[in-house]
Image (tube, rainbow, N blue to C red):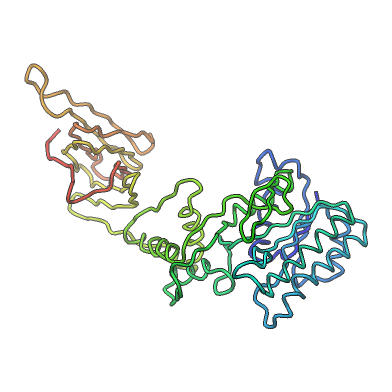
Amino acid sequence: MKILVTGAKGFVGRNLCEALKNIRDGKDRRERYQQLLPLTVFEYDREGTIGELEGYCAEADFVFNLAGVNRPKEQSEFMEGNRDFGETLIALLEKHGNSCPVMLSSSVQATLCGRYAGSPYGESKLAGEELVFEHASRMGASAYVYRFPNLYGKWCRPNYNSAVATFCDAIANGREFHVNDASVELELLYIDDLVAAMLGTLVGNVQRCDYEEVACVPNEAGRYCFAPGAQKATLGEIVELLEGFRDARETLEVPDLAEGSFSKKLYSTFLGYYEPGDFAYDLKPNVDNRGSFTEFLRTSERGQVSVNVSKPGITKGNHWHMSKWEKFLVVSGTASIKLRKVGRDVDGSLFPVDEYIVKGSDMRVVEMIPGYTHSITNLSDTEDLVTVMWANESFDPEKPDTYYEEV
């Protein structure tokens, strides 16, 4: 299949083109996309010539028209960029008798309802929509018109047309920013969800809808298309999440990463706005004459991850927990990990010791059981022992649940 993407260097275009090239180059091997192979991607942007565009229009099997103008110097440029380019594109397709499907990136502003009434941008987008529908009627082609809500994700340009991108850039890099009204609610669509929907149009998986003013209403026979996954958040909620992501380098807190959650998608977006040279940060090890213990990650629901370093011959632990449990994974060195049930058996004897000798090469997890005192000893005379430790809850000094008792 030969696919033409206009506006290929823009935010949506770049994400789509990279996804298509992953399929083309065999990096994305998901079965549903194999029917597209062999795949050719024609990338067209404003630097391209009309001659190049015509050549692509003559050969294309599918067109994604993502070209458009969002922030012109003059309002007249809205029509020039959003309607006039569409006229050129359609004329070239029809010149070559090409009735391939056309997808158009429009905007919810094209509804011209509510706060979008009289919007020059919305009017230009609506004009572009009608061009595509009329072309489809004349040529018997399929038309896929998507009215995008607010988009966010990697490579989105800050201080342009995305509040999320602007806030991400400012908060990640310590720049000033302003929120005029924190209660303003946005409908937000993550770029990967949008790209998945656009790829779906290539393989016959299209979600259709109609519009009741600005509201998208799913309808199998609808005139428009939509990408599932749009979510709503206020500006205040967005800023609060982003500031938490920034502070996580100090607090070590990991946010909600539930599949499909806004927090997960926003965190993936936020990380992309750190500038090169600022991708690393230091942790704060607790060091003593036995070695060190360093927290790596904390979560509210999935516990805490730490790295423990023990010097040669050193034993750590010799304590037990009422409810807390842990997993130890030795990644370097050799350890003796011992556990013993707290208390005594029916004969009044201490319960037997359960011992595990583990090496970094073993990649073997030993679990610390509630009600069992436990210890870890570095068996080497010369090398440090390095252990990754996970606890089911983050350490709380007000409720340590840690009680000394030698194994």
In front here: 229 or 61?
229
Residue 98: image quadrant is bottom right
In front here: 67 or 137?
137
169 left or right, relative to 371? right
In front here: 355 or 4?
4
Residue 364: image quadrant is top left
138 left or right, relative to 205? right
Q: Considering only vertical position in the picture, is 12 above or below 329?
A: below
Residue in the picture at 65% in, 61% down: 12
Residue in the picture at 51% in, 71% down: 166
Residue 236, percent from left and from top: 42, 66
Residue 404, percent from left and from top: 12, 40
Assign the C terminus to one quadrant of the image.
top left
269 left or right, relative to 351? right
Q: Considering only vertical position in the picture, is 405 above or below 309?
A: above
Residue 242: image quadrant is bottom left
Residue in the picture at 51% in, 48% down: 260
Residue lying furthest left in this view?
Answer: 348
